[in-house]
Structures are given as C-alpha cells and as structure tokens.
Image: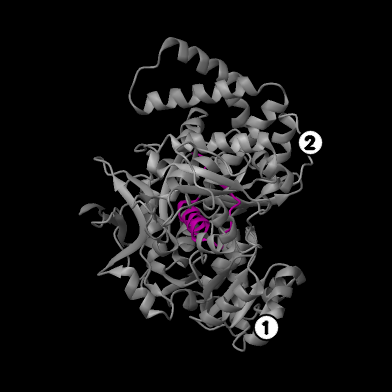
Amino acid sequence: MIQFDLPPVVPADPSANVSDLLADRVAATPDRALFAVPDGAGWRDVSARDFEQQVIALAKGFIAAGVQPGEKVAFIARTTYDWALVDFALFYAGAVMVPVYETSSPSQISWILSDSGAIAAIVESADHAHRLDEVRSDLPLVREVWAMHAGDLDTLVARGASIDDAEVQRRRSIANSGDIATLIYTSGSTGRPKGCVLTHGNFVELARNSAKALHEVVETPGASTLLFITTAHVFARFISLLNVHAGVKTGHQPDTKQLLPALGTFKPTFLLAVPRVFEKVYNSAEQKAEAGGKGKIFRAAAATAVEHSEREQQGKSIPLLLKIKFALFDRLVYSKLREAMGGRVVYAVSGSAPLGPRLGHFFRSLGVVILEGYGLTETTAPATVNLATKSKIGTVGPVLPGVSVRLADDGEIQVRGINVFAEYWRNPEATAEAFDGDWFKTGDIGAFDADGFLSITGRKKEIIVTAGGKNVAPAALEDPIRANPIVGQVVVVGDHKPFISALVTLDPEMLPTWLSNNGLPADMSLEEAAKNEKVRAEVQGAIDRANTRVSRAESIRKFTILPTEWTEASGHLTPKMSIKRNVIVSDFAGDIEDIYAVPVNTTNVSLP
C-alpha cells in the first residue's frame, strides 16, 4: 500500500472556529480591501473592518429573528458579495448554513431542507422564492423565508439594531473546532444527495495550512481573485474562506457571459476555475482566430506553447528556433490572451474534474501556472494540489500539510487528516461504508509517482468491464474528446459488451462559430448537425486522437451523436456540471442498443 503524509505546518487550535478567520484578519489589517463590489463600470473596495461591521449588523438581525446557535438556515443564491456576507453573518450568529445550488429544482430543495432540518431559508430571487413556495407545505420546520430581492436583508439589519455587540461575540465564540460549521449536500451524481458534515476545524485548519503551502499565490502583492463558480459548492466556498484568512481581495461575477469584461476591469492575480472554463477560453480563442483567417497561426502558436512548456518541465534545453517562435507568438497571440484575462493573472487553481496536459502546458506558456488539485466535498475541497514551486502538469499535485493520502490494493484513493468530514448527516450506514478506520474511501482510482505527485486514473464505480474482460476507465477517453470545441459532453459505454462505444452531444455555444468557419449554416439545428458528415468527421477525429492514448481493446469503435443537450434541467448533469452516468445510460439505453445491433470490425467506424 502506497502512502504519502505531510504533517501540519500550523498547530491546531481546538477552540477556533470559522468566524475567527475574519476576526483575526480585521485585527491584523483592518483597512485592507477584503472584497470589491461592482460600482458602475468599475469596482468599489470593501475593507476588512467595513465587511465585519456589515456581518455583525446582519448577524444581529438573525439573532433578533430568533435563530438559535446550531440551527440550520438554508441559502439559495448566486455567487455574489451577499453570499460572503450571509455566510459570515450566520457564523457570527452561531448558526449553520445549508447551501443549496441556485439551479436546484423544487424537489431537490425540498429534500435538502427537510433532511437537514432547516428552520429558515434565504433566497436571492423571485424565481428561487417561487421554487421554494412550491414545496413549502412539505417543510413544516421552516419558520421564515427571507427574500433578498424584496430587501429582507436590510429589514433584518434594522430588526437587529437593538441587539448588543456582546451577544454577537458570545454567539460567534460558542462553536469550537469539532462542531459542525456547515452542511453541504453532495451533487447527487450517483443517487440522492447526502449531507456532508464539515466542521469548523476542517475549514480553519485547512485554510491556515493551505495558506502556507500556497503562500506565493495568496501573498502576491495586491493578491486578488474573481469568483464566478458557484459558492454553494465546497471548492469556491473554501477558497472564499481561505481568501479572508489570507487577506486576498475577492470579487464576484455570477454571470459567466460577463466574465471576460469583469476580468478586464477587476484584473485578478489568480483564478479559480473548473477545466471546462479553460477549455472554453482556448476553444473560443481558436474559433475566433479561425473566423479571422488566422486559425493556422493560432494552432502553430498553441503547438509551440505546449512544446516549450513540456521541454521546460522535463528540464530539457530550448532549441534556438523554438525560442524565436515562442517570442514571436508571445507578441502575436499569448499577450492578447493574457490581456483578455485581465493582464495580471499569474496562477489559476483548477479542480472538480481532470484538466488535460495540453491545456496545462498551453496556459503555462501564457504565463499562467495552472495549479490542478484534487478533492471532494467530503475532504473540504483540496486533499492534494500542485504548488507554485512544486508542480507537475498532468498530475493533481502532492498532499497538502495536515493531509495523508494512500492507495488501497485496488488503487482506490483514501484520505485522512484535517480536511476529512465528520460524517454523513443522519446517515450512519453511508458513513460506515465510506470509511476504513479513519481513512475516507473516495471511490476514485489513482497513482503516485516517485515524488509523491498524485494522478487520477478513473472512478471505481465507473470502471467498464467489456465482454472480453478488459477493464476500461471512461475518463481516460472522455476528457480528451470533451476538449474538442464542438463536443458538449461524452459518455463512454460498453459494460459487458464486445467493444467500447460512446454517446456524444454537441456544444450549442461553440457549434455555430465552428459551422460558420467550416462553410456550413451557422443556424443548423442540433439534429441536423448530428447527421452532418463534416460534424461527424470532426467528432471522429477527436475520438481517433483519444484512442491513441489507450490500447486497442480500450479504444472506441463506434459512436453516435445525440440530437439533444445534456443539462442540469434535463436531469443528466449535476449542479457542478458532472455527468450523471447512470441516468444517461438508462435514458439512452435504446441508443446504446442500436450501437451494438450491428457487429463492428477492428477499425473505428461511426454509427450511420
């Protein structure tokens, strides 16, 4: 059994809770800008002291409204400044937040609020309020619903004006390291969401140790980041708390369609994103270049960037010709992409799904070091992460201080340490099943290199076993195919079948530009595009390239392009955009059977 451990670099404080992260920051740098909020065409800074004053005022409102220490309050909202404000106000009031994805359906909202025992809920918009209203009769424990769009946060602040400061300080000091800080529900890719009990110690100790491990990132002069992925997910939630501890200025942009303009005005020093965002940036730039007749130049620049970065990582010398090409493309291509991201981005933290090495090397040559990491809700986000001074593209990095990771005999990744959750809420059976002693069984398959860098090779429950007995990890094929600009999603199938196949959907955002660049009508429907020979050839090319990474027995022999889109609303994606494999295989069982109705020879062919 292979195991890597790294002891904490910051001593644990059993009396600490999350509210101390803000209180300590205010004591250290009261005038430092901790947040920035949109203000006209720019941004207005909010100092640490001013933020805490707003937090205390809202916490008094919750206290005046009767929220007791330890009670659960649900929160449905997009990624905005108000998210951080409500988060800390509930901590200061001694309450426990239960975040709900802002895209959740009424039935999902009902399950999370009823299972958690929430006594109140905060909603951002009329749409959120309407969804909650649909199931309110099924939630007898919910005493109050506060609507941000109706000004209820201001009403709460006014209501709490008579509450003494000492009561807030008493409330915020009640919880200690071992107490529940938040109840985050898993995204439900394999069934009904389970509530993960994350403690104050999970957040505090992980934030304090991660700040040391990532000090180059969070201590860059003028360090700042623009959050745009949902703060209801543990990944952004943890980074938001880490930023408060480290004094990093945070902005928010909930509308990803406005991301590029926001980056241009906010000018962050580091980004937090999932791989799909980096794929979109790359693919959009490529298609824009193609439309302007510069596609060949862009592809040459990309190939040069990847080669340059690969040679640097391998410690090889850079040939003179490559140096010249790199310098030329830096002026023509790379500098423009850097400027599009605000011009100051040095690091980008990536998680939630694997990032292909090609993209990692490409962005590194742009001057953006992507620090890919690995973790789950159950590990308070990161367990491993590449560091500024210790990084290998194609891996998810070494273990963080205070964390231990081992590989079981079957390759399963298991984690213990300061970041591992306490239990699944009111679910002792699932909790017992998830642990081997004090080791959390992640369900993911991985491998360590000699230097302790972890690579993710698949998911235990997703391993496909063909009729010939070959074990196939779908992610190894799906991730490179999904990087193609016109591919929306892909699911590899073939369990107990004679060969491996794939279901593919098209990306409706990227498709029109690609169609136009390839001499096809930009308004072609998904159904028409799924049958078009040029489109099919593009997908076949992506599959052929993915097949070069695996053995013949693991390669995709057939595929079908579905004339539909998989979304969270359709029930095929989780709120964090992960595929619900079991749902897709069930809903498209007929399409899968059609693939295997006709035998296939040893060459790769697409479904007619």
Secondary structure at badge 2 equals: loop
Q: Is residue 12 magenta?
A: no
- Vertical placement of residue 103 versus 363, above or below: below
Q: Is residue 399 visible?
A: no
Q: For mark 2, does the 10 Å Cα neighbourhood hold few (<14), some (14 to 19), or many (20 or more) residues?
A: some
Q: Which amino acid lies under the numbered mark 1 shown in the image of this protein? A: Arg
**Label 1 packing within 10 angstroms: few (<14), some (14-19), many (20+):** some
- Check residue 217 in the rendering and tell me which mark sits there, or answer none: none
Drawn side of residue 145 relative to residue 207, left or right: right
Residue under circle 2? 521
Write down the quadrant of residue 552 in the picture: top left
- For image coordinates 37% across by 48% down, the residue present is 457
Residue at (67% x, 26% y) in the render: 289
Check disc 2 and give the amino acid type. Pro
The Cα–Cα distance between marks 1 and 2, rounded to whole angstroms, is 47 Å
Whole-percent x, y for residue 46 in the image: 62, 54
Q: Please name which of the two marks, 1 or 2, marks the residue nearer to the observer.
A: 2
Residue 348 or 407: which is nearer the viewer?
A: 407
Q: Is residue 395 left or right of residue 66?
A: left
- In the depicted view, which residue is nearer to us: 202 or 518? 518
User: Magenta span covers which residues?
Assistant: 221-247
Find the residue positioned furthest to the top.
320
Q: Secondary structure at mark 1?
A: helix
State the residue at coordinates (52%, 29%).
Answer: 366
Vertical relation: 578 (above or below) 134: above
Residue that numbered label 1 is attached to: 136
Q: Earlier in the sequence, mark 1 or mark 2?
A: 1
Please report the residue visible at 51 percent of the width from the left and 71 percent of the height from the top.
91
